[in-house]
């Protein structure tokens, strides 16, 4: 296909193939950022902050979706005292203690102190007496059932890294020392990268479904941020060697504006020559499903001149494999070291 024709198709898809956001065309400013923060639930000033599950706070719901009245927002500052778990301690697990996070591995990455996590109040619904007495860890009926069974989780992430990450990016070289994990959960990937390869990372996470993802990352000694993944990221341009996302990331973009801005923001914070990896991305049906998302994504790849390392599609779990709109997308691309001739879309 001639070079000019490829660019014409990319321009068409990015500027005119936008049935849901017609008013967005032609705006040079990023008017999708939030001008005001979201208020938390009611609290008494200078007193103890409410010790409620975060899912009961609409502010956390808003940053998770990233959108409130077509704006990506952040949490507001509040003047109350954050509650501390009863009996808080950062001392490591010792044999014989009632620790729901006990692991055979002795390092803090895989055996964070349970007393640093408020299991008894904020996350009490996820621990039952029978679970505690017979199994030693809570049961989690969601897509992260092993996140808090640390030895099991460790083996799972080691397998994932060696099968799906290491063959495509130079984890063992000095070219890749920093990673941003978008949708980091309890920090399993970052723990493996730090332990096996000495790679440092930051995870964007939150206590989803009232599970202590963010608190567990902190207890493990990992850095987790509770921010919208659809807003502007609080990092300088070129801050990371790689951005990674699995079962998260672009699936939360429900319209073309957030979809475009999501990938352009990834491009901003990864360094020239860095890598962007997204595995098992489930396109949002509000955008029209896989076909529409794929076309728009390919136009963005062309515009930013990313180079594919791999791209694949697979049937969406639980869906009819013959239904083309119900598929997951996985890709790894490399950002070019320079884009000297990149001009305006029009």
Image (tube, rainbow, N blue to C red):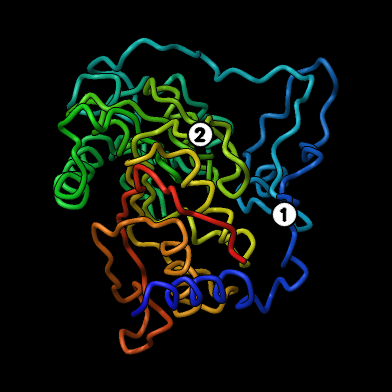
Q: Nearer the viewer, residue 37 or 33?
A: 33
Quarter of the image with the N terminus is bottom left
Tell me residue 90's x, y (percent): 41, 12
Of the two numbered discs 2 and 1 in the rendering, the one whose residue sits closer to the viewer:
1
When asked about the image quadrant of residue 27, the answer is bottom right
Distance, label 2 to label 1, CA atoms, is 19 Å
* Picture layout, residue 53 above or below residue 251: above
Q: Which mark is residue 28?
A: 1
Q: Are marks 2 and 1 in contact (CB under 8 Å)?
A: no
Reading the chain from its start, which is encountered first: label 2 or label 1? 1
Q: Residue tagged by mark 2?
A: 237
In the image, what residue occupies the spot 34% across and 72% down? 317
Task: Indicate the secondary structure of the residue bearing disc 2.
Answer: loop
Q: Nearer the viewer, residue 345 or 211?
A: 345
* Picture layout, residue 232 above or below residue 84: below
Disc 2: CA contacts within 10 A as few (<14), some (14-19) or many (>=20): some
Tell me residue 345's x, y (percent): 58, 63
Disc 1: CA contacts within 10 A as few (<14), some (14-19) or many (>=20): few
């Amino acid at each position: 296909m001639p070079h000019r024709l490829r660019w014409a198709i990319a321009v068409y898809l990015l500027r005119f193939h936008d049935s849901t956001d017609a008013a967005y065309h032609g705006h040079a400013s990023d008017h999708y950022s939030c001008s005001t923060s979201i208020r938390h639930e009611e609290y008494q000033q200078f007193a103890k902050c409410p010790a409620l599950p975060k899912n009961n706070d609409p502010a956390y719901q808003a940053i998770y979706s990233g959108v409130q009245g077509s704006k990506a927002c952040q949490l507001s500052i509040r003047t109350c005292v954050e509650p501390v778990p009863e009996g808080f301690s950062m001392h490591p697990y010792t044999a014989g203690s009632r620790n729901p996070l006990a692991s055979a591995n002795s390092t803090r990455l895989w055996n964070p102190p349970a007393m640093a996590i408020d299991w008894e109040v904020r996350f009490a619904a996820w621990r039952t007496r029978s679970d505690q007495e017979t199994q030693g860890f809570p049961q989690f009926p969601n897509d992260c059932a092993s996140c808090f069974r640390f030895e099991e989780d460790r083996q799972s992430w080691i397998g994932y890294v060696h099968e799906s990450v290491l063959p495509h990016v130079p984890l063992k070289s000095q070219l890749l020392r920093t990673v941003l994990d978008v949708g980091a959960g309890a920090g399993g990937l970052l723990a493996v990268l730090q332990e096996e390869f000495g790679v440092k990372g930051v995870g964007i996470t939150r206590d989803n479904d009232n599970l202590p993802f963010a608190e567990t990352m902190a207890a493990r000694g990992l850095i987790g941020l509770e921010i919208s993944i659809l807003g502007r990221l609080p990092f300088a341009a070129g801050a990371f060697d790689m951005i990674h996302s699995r079962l998260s990331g672009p699936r939360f973009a429900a319209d073309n504006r957030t979809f475009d801005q999501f990938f352009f923001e990834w491009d901003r914070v990864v360094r020239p020559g860095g890598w962007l990896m997204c595995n098992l991305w489930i396109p949002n049906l509000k955008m029209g499903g896989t076909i529409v998302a794929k076309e728009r994504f390919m136009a963005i790849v062309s515009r930013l001149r990313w180079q594919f390392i791999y791209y694949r599609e697979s049937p969406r779990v639980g869906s009819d494999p013959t239904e083309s709109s119900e598929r997951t997308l996985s890709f790894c691309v490399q950002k070019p070291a320079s884009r000297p001739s990149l001009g305006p879309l029009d």
